[in-house]
């Protein structure tokens, strides 16, 4: 299992479009990919789960990846968030 914290930079947080991009990126990996914010945990491969966390700009989330390609999956999630998720 690997984990890393990252701050959401999108001005409007994880609304539908960036959340969809995050999920699309997560689905490319076999590992279980989740993230935590405060006391909420979301499955990064599930759009409804991601949207349910109500992530806003400036929020810090911790990605947790577990599985055969966990290191690559974690690096990809951090890269996606740092790139602004297409916005």
Image: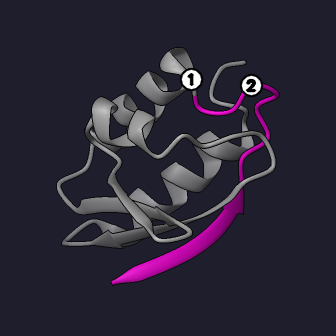
Residue 11: % across, % down: 82, 28
Q: CA distance from mark 1 to mark 2?
A: 7 Å
For the N terminus, the quadrant is bottom left
The residue that appears at 59% across and 32% down in the rendered structure is: 14
From the viewer's side, name the closer residue of 28 and 87: 87
Q: Which mark is residue 15?
A: 1
Residue visible at 60% across and 55% down? 78
1 and 2 marks in contact (CB < 8 Å): yes
Crowding around mark 2 (Cα neighbors within 10 Å: few <14, some 14 to 19, many 20+) is few
Q: Which mark is residue 12?
A: 2
Residue drawn at x 27%, y 65% is 69
Residue range corresponding to the magenta coloring: 1-14
Give residue 24's position: percent from left, percent from top: 35, 29
Colour setup of the view: one colour
Q: Residue furthest bottom?
A: 1
Q: Which mark is residue 5?
A: none
Q: Secondary structure at mark 1?
A: loop
Q: Is residue 57 left or right of residue 77?
A: right
> Does 45 sit left or right of 76 as displayed?
left
Task: From this view, report whether residue 50 is shown above or below residue 58.
Answer: above
Secondary structure category for the residue under label 2: loop
Q: How many dots with numbers?
A: 2
Q: Is residue 11 covered in magenta?
A: yes
Q: Quadrant of the C terminus?
A: top right
Where in the figure is residue 50, as x and y percent of width and height? Answer: 40, 40
* Residue at image coords 60%, 43%: 55
Q: Quadrant of residue 84?
A: top right
């Amino acid at each position: 299992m690997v984990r890393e914290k990252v701050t959401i930079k999108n001005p409007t947080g994880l609304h539908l479009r960036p959340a969809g991009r995050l999920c699309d990126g997560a689905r490319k990996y076999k590992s279980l990919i989740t993230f935590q914010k405060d006391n909420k945990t979301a499955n990064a491969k599930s759009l409804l789960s991601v949207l349910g966390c109500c992530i806003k700009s400036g929020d810090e989330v911790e990605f947790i990846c577990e599985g055969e390609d966990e290191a690559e999956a974690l690096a990809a999630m951090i890269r996606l968030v740092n790139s602004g998720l297409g916005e």
